[in-house]
Amino acid sequence: MEKLLICTQVTSKMSGQSITAAPETVDEKPKPKNVERKPKSKFRHWRGYMSDQVSEFMSNSSIHGFKYLVGNERTLFEKIMWFGVLLGSIYMCSLWIISAYQAWEENPAFIGVGQAPVRAWEIPFPAITICPQYTYNKYSAYRFPNIEELRQNITTLLDLCIYFQENNKYDNIDFFEGEPWEKFLTETALSPNQFILKSFLTDGTDTMDVGFSTILNKWGVCHSFNMLDKADLFRNATHIFQSFGKQNQVSYWSFDQNYYKKKESVYPRRLKTLIDNLVVDLESELDYIACSSSNKYYINLHHPGESPTPGGIIAVQSGKDYTIWIKPEITMASERLRSYSPSRKKCFFSDERYLQFYKIYTEENCKLECLANYTLTVCGCVPAHFPHNKTTKLCGRNRTGCRQKSERTMARFESGLNEDPVCNCLPSCNSIVYTWEVETRKSDIVHRISVKVQYKNAKFNVLERNELFGDVNFWASCGGILGLFTGFSVLCLVETIYYLFFRLMYKLFKMLWKKLHLKG
């Protein structure tokens, strides 16, 4: 190592003085030969640039609290304090957003009282189904096959009626299994003109006679007015009771939308004014023709698009006249709910769920179909009045115990006492349940029961299913929560994308362009 002695003498012409610097020694290091400098790491270069971008973003961001985490003018304690405040705000914000999401996911709909009432002519008049307590005509021409189990000489229904009364063995007849049971019901049933003396509908100033068509339900062969035709109610694969009566075709009506208001001639029928009504006169003495001394009828009011069910029947008997006041309970759903899954809105529109036997989904149709399938699984057969296909075996009277057991089990499913893994019969989003009040008075005419059916009021309150927490409500709630705790908004999102994406992409593009330009 060499040491050089450097002496410098500076003479100042302006002052006339000379300044002599002290000797200075400098260690001169030999320069290494052929040593190349290592280029800077590209990773370190990008890491530094990204760090600068993040610092710039946090310094200029409109999100609350970010600017206090960077910069040299704040102490470490201040930065830690603000970091804790920011974490607490984000935590509370997350809890509230999760709560809002759960409300949006689990309860997007609610049922409230509608603002405008529904008038009587905007909804269908209920279907009226009338069943004699015992529907067998003992003078029927039906002839029984040989019945070995009875060991009696029984060939006609009159013989069988006498046997029932003498031996009380109605539930022990095995020959009623399968198709013979349906044939028996068809050929021995009372026809409407044997017990319905007259029936007419008043529509404003007009009065028109109306007919009842034959159907089959729990009470046997019954007769219904204003019910949908089998072609509109059942699917093609459904086996239809061969005596099922013909009804009018659906006209200017749908289950979810009800009527097209400008049309006059519609089906199902509707009443236009409060004084319109249906009047049915029934024969009060059926001893001479029925296989029983009972003179009682069962009347069921139900939706035209549903099969009559055992619940909610009105029993009428001789010696009295009846006025049935109808009070519909109407639930209507907003079309906006169609975008939600049934599990979220807790209901089905009439075309949202496929039923095996019915074309229209209603809760009652679904329950009846599910009961039929469950009974078939448990008993190996179904009652004739249950929906079924042509190859399904029909239960006779001897399987009453099994049928009743399946009905009790399904009732436990419906009540929630047992888990229901099969049916999933959610309520209908749009529904009309016909409730009623009954007034009775002593009949003035012998051998006649008069039944009048009409609305209690001209207008009815409506329950509406609407969005409780729609998509807009959810995002507005999230925006409010984010703004409350962090000041975050859509513009903050744009800032974040600008600083942490576009600026970086621009830098990368610029570097690549420069590199390509130098190579060119």
Image (cartoon, grey):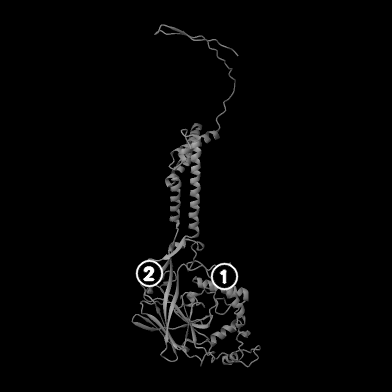
Q: Give the side of residue 48 with respect to residue 14, left or right.
A: right
Give whichever of 439, 291 is nearer the camera: 439
Q: Mark 2: which amino acid?
A: Pro
Disc 2 crowd rating (10 Å Cα; few below 14, some 14-19, many 20+) is: some
- Mark 2 residue element: loop
CA gap, disc 2 to disc 1?
A: 35 Å
Pinpoint residue 34: horizontal percent, then vertical percent. 59, 22
- Mark 1 residue element: helix
Q: Mark 1: which amino acid?
A: Phe
Q: Mark 2 points at which residue?
A: 117
The image quadrant where one finds the N terminus is top right
Identity of the residue drawn at 45% across and 63% down: 110
Give whichever of 385, 260 is nearer the camera: 385
- Residue 162, image quadrant: bottom right
Task: Tell me if residue 481 can be seen.
Answer: yes
> Does residue 174 lie above or below 346 as drawn?
below
> Does residue 187 lie above or below 375 as drawn?
below
Give whichever of 24, 502 is nearer the camera: 24
Pinpoint residue 376: horizontal percent, then vertical percent. 60, 75
Identity of the residue drawn at 49% across and 85% down: 297
- Residue 274, image quadrant: bottom left
Disc 1 crowd rating (10 Å Cα; few below 14, some 14-19, many 20+) is: some
Task: Tell me if residue 249 can be seen.
Answer: no
Q: Name the residue under label 1.
A: 413
